[in-house]
Amino acid sequence: MAGPAALSAAAAALVAALLLLRREEQGPGAGPSMAETEALSKLREDFRMQNKSVFILGASGETGRALLKEILEQGLFSKVTLIGRRKLTFNEEAYKNVNQEVVDFEKLEDYASAFQGHDVGFCCLGTTRAKAGAEGFVRVDRDYVLKSAELAKAGGCKHFNLVSSKGADKSSNFLYLQVKGEVEAKIEELKFDRYSVFRPGVLLCDRQESRPGEWLVRKFFGSLPESWASGQSVPLVTVVRAMLNNVVRPSDKQMELLENKAIHDLGKAHGSLKP
C-alpha cells in the first residue's frame, strides 16, 4: 500500500493535471501537411547521406530509451553517443556500436570533451520533485540541462532538441512548470543554429520506474474520450517519432516550439520511413 508521501505526490500530480486542462495550447503548432508526410521518406534518406553524429542525454529514462531505440531502427545517424552518469548495458546486437560517455554532472566542465563533435543533441534529462526533492529537481532539470547545453554549444552542436513539458512557463507558480520554462529560455539565449523544444502533455507509457502520481494521472486520462485526452496526453512513441521526423525537416527558424498537438500530428507521420 502506498504511504502518505506517495499518496500526497499522486494527489499533487492529479491537481496539476486538472489545472493544465484549463490552459489553452500555447499555439496551434504546425503539423505536417499531406505533402510533408509524403516527402518525409526522401528527407530521411537525404539526412542519412549527411553522416551526422548525435548525442542523447538521459538515455536511461523512458523517453531517452525510446528515442535511442527509434534512432537505431531508423538508422539516421552515423554515430550515436550516450552521455550519462553511468554506463548502460545493452544485450541486443543493434546497440553494439553505440558510444557511451560517463560523466559527473556535478563537475561537467571536466567532461567537455564528451560534448564535442556532435551535430545534433537530444536532451531527455529530468527527474521529479518526489524523487529528488525540490533542490535536487532544480539541479537536474535546470542546472544540469543548461550546463550540458552550454558545453554542447561550445563543442559544435548545431541543432539542440529539448524535451520540456506542456504548460512550461517561467512565471508559473508551480515549481515544475516554472523550472521547465526557465531552462527553455536560458538555452534559447545560447543561440544554437537550430533549437527545438517539445512540450508533450502526460506521457502515456509503462514506466520501469515507479511514479504513483503519474500512474494515477495516466489512469485518469485513460478514462476520458480519446479526442479529449489527446489534447492533454500523448503516447511516448509518438513523441520520439515527432522528434526524429522534425530533425530531418529543413527549417529556417532558429527556435521552434512544438506543443502537444503538433507533436501528435508530426509523430503520426511515420509510415514507411524505416530503411
Image (cartoon, rainbow, N blue to C red):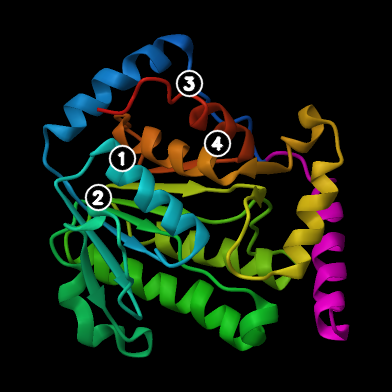
Q: Is residue 21 magenta?
A: yes
Mark nearer the N terminus (2 vs 1): 1
Crowd rating for badge 2 (residues with CA inside 10 Å; few <14, some 14–19, many 20+): few
User: Mark 2 belongs to which amino acid?
Assistant: Ala
User: Mark 4 belongs to which amino acid?
Assistant: Ile
Counting from the top left corner in percent of width and height, residue 266 is at 49, 29
The majority secondary structure of the magenta stretch comes to: helix
Q: Closer to the camera: disc 2 or disc 4?
A: 2
- Please tell me which residue is depicted at 79% across the width and 56% down the height of the picture: 217
State the CA–CA distance, disc 2 to disc 3: 30 Å
Crowd rating for badge 4 (residues with CA inside 10 Å; few <14, some 14–19, many 20+): many
> Of 47 and 92, which appears nearest the observer?
92
Q: Is residue 112 magenta?
A: no
One can see residue 192 in this view: yes
Q: Closer to the camera: disc 2 or disc 3?
A: 2
Q: Are marks 3 and 1 in contact (CB under 8 Å)?
A: no
Crowd rating for badge 3 (residues with CA inside 10 Å; few <14, some 14–19, many 20+): many
What residue span does the magenta drawing correspond to? Answer: 1-25
Which residue position is annotated with label 1? 73
Mark nearer the N terminus (3 vs 4): 3
Mark nearer the N terminus (2 vs 3): 3
Q: Secondary structure at mark 4?
A: helix
Q: Which mark is residue 263?
A: 4
Which residue position is annotated with label 2? 94
Counting from the top left corner in percent of width and height, residue 93 is at 23, 53
Which residue position is annotated with label 3? 32
Q: Closer to the camera: disc 2 or disc 1?
A: 2
